[in-house]
Amino acid sequence: MVMIVALALFGLSGTAHASPAAPSPPGRADLLAERLAKDPIQVTDHALRDLRPGTAARIRALVARLGVPVYVVVGPPRLPEGTRSRDLIPLLRDRLGKDGVYLVTDPDAGGTAQQFGGSLPVDRAWTVAALELPYEADIADHVQRWVEILTAPNVARRIDQRRPRPEDTTPSRGEVRDRKEMTAFGVGTALGCVPLLTFLIVARLRKAARR
């Protein structure tokens, strides 16, 4: 009896060793790192819907001016719950194993940047670029301004002397509505005056004829 129990336990133990646990599926950082290894400029499918054609090519040409390796991820406006771009960047660096500038952003120019193996103020420059540009600027415009700041002769001074955001001259919906209402009111008033003026002119002509 004891021998049978021992053999049964041995068989169960052997079965457990013969069936290792399935590996966990790769996470977001793993998938992005694999893509960055093939192409350092990654624009996800979700982001492509909100971007102009050729945005990725324009970003690629712009970051090449920095003269250092640059890895860019343009993802959806909202990352999975509990994930921040600031936390995702070190994970990408760890998975990819390469120094350089890492920029994780979205079509609205959110996110941030970080450099490994260098001292460029990439995060501050990204923030300043967002503060300088008008609200309707697209992500490629933000990257262009970011690169301009980082390639300035004196980067620190350029950041400290932040340019004011240009005023938005585009009328708001409320202003457009008010203008339409004022125009309609003016036209209505003018049309209402026409019969009165006609009546006065005719009456004056008749009075003159009687004289």
Image (cartoon, rainbow, N blue to C red):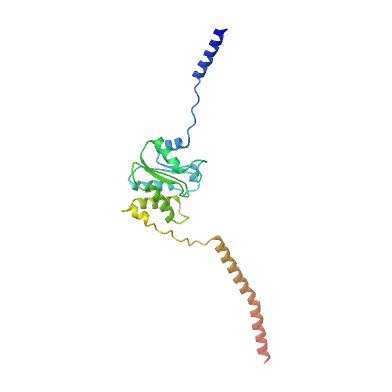
Residue sitting at x 39%, y 44%: 114
Q: Quadrant of residue 87?
A: top left
Which residue is the extreme one toward the right? 210
Q: Position of residue 176 (x, y in %)?
A: 55, 63
Question: Is 23 placed left or right of 120 in the picture?
Answer: right
Q: Is residue 57 above or below residue 23?
A: below
Question: Is 15 placed left or right of 156 in the picture?
Answer: right
Q: Position of residue 93 (x, y in %)?
A: 40, 38
Which residue is the extreme one toward the left? 153
Q: Is residue 74 above or below residue 168?
A: above
Which residue is the extreme one toward the front? 2
Front residue (pair 7, 204): 7
Q: Quadrant of residue 194?
A: bottom right
Q: Position of residue 142 (x, y in %)?
A: 42, 51
| Label tally | 0
**Which quadrant: the C terminus?**
bottom right
**Which quadrant: the N terminus?**
top right
Q: Position of residue 106 (x, y in %)?
A: 47, 46
Residue sitting at x 51%, y 16%: 13
